[in-house]
Image (cartoon, rainbow, N blue to C red):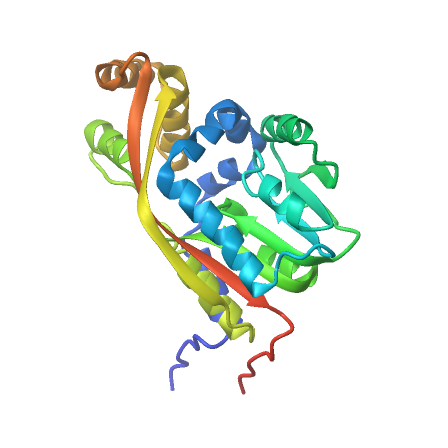
Amino acid sequence: MKKVPDPFRPEFWKAYQESFKTPEDEAFLKPDFWDRMADTYDDLEENAFYREMVATVVAEMERAGALSPDFSLFDLCCGTGTYTLRFAPRVRRVVALDVSSGMLAVLRRKLEAAGLRNVEVVEADWRTWSPSETFDTVFVSLTPVLNDLKEVDRLLEITRRFLVVVQWAGLRENELFREVLERFFGRRPRPRSPGAVVLFNYLFSLGYPADLRFFSGVWERSRPLEKEIERLLFKIRGEGLAVDEKLREALRAYLEDKAREGRVPSRTRVRIALLVVDLKKEALAFA
């Protein structure tokens, strides 16, 4: 009899997640791209939907008990500190880690301006970093690190109480990027992992049911022309497509027609999930 895959086993979800991986994914785990985007990354906080989502995430964490004055918190792939700065006044100590020196330079300036002294900033690649402690709450948001469920296992190992994840949930469509791929390559972006759907089921298969909340909306951003060109070329390479000088010049001409006062507007339709796991709740058990 043919063996039927068992979705109640962690191995099922690890294999499913692996099916979406490509060699190009590695580029998004290195600092180069994020360093180049660091000085415009916080533009997203001008978007009302994004601000409301971040505020709701923090409020939900407080409601669940994941933020407490006596807690230590680990903020993985913290970027420029969108959440770090909101966590720091609410907990005893934050360790904020990111691979991008550019992102962390912005974070350090923001911490200094806010007078926050309880944040330890760590520049490192999580995949090779060895933490020397565990944390009451481990938080991670919208990072490609989550595309490897073995890294989720490592996060659980350093979590004393709460694992909190903000992750894509099956929809992340940048309209400008889709237009560029269709115009210059005659194709749409490659399929991506359902993200939070896989993560929820993986945690469930481990015996950790997560509280789940979804956010759906549109991110509207406007980047300088040169920044948008670099971003799109990087993402095109991430699709496994060739980039040369001819494409760069054609893309520049295309974006110049769309630019307004030297900035290129774009819209991204997103669905994002918040998963909160309390490890002290009674775990599920599967025979």
Give the answer, above or below, for where 94 lies relative to 186: below
The answer to which quarter of the image holds residue 188 is top left
Residue 229: give x, y in percent of width and height.
Answer: 36, 20
* Image side of residue 211 versus residue 120, left or right: left
Q: Quadrant of the N terminus?
A: bottom left
Which residue extends farthest right?
A: 132
Give the answer, above or below, for where 188 lies relative to 184: below
The answer to which quarter of the image holds residue 162 is bottom right
**Residue sitting at x 61%, y 63%:** 65
Residue 73 visible to the viewer = yes
**Residue sitting at x 60%, y 32%:** 100
**Residue sitting at x 20%, y 28%:** 183
Residue 191 visible to the viewer = no
Foreground: 274 or 11? Answer: 274
Give the answer, above or below, for where 253 lies relative to 4: above
The answer to which quarter of the image holds residue 129 is top right
Residue 68: give x, y in percent of width and height.
Answer: 67, 57
Q: Quadrant of the C terminus?
A: bottom right
Give the answer, above or below, for where 63 lies relative to 218: below
Residue 128: give x, y in percent of width and height.
Answer: 69, 45
**Residue sitting at x 48%, y 30%:** 42
Q: How many marks?
A: 0
Residue 99: give x, y in percent of width and height.
Answer: 62, 36
* Image side of residue 85 versus residue 33, left or right: right
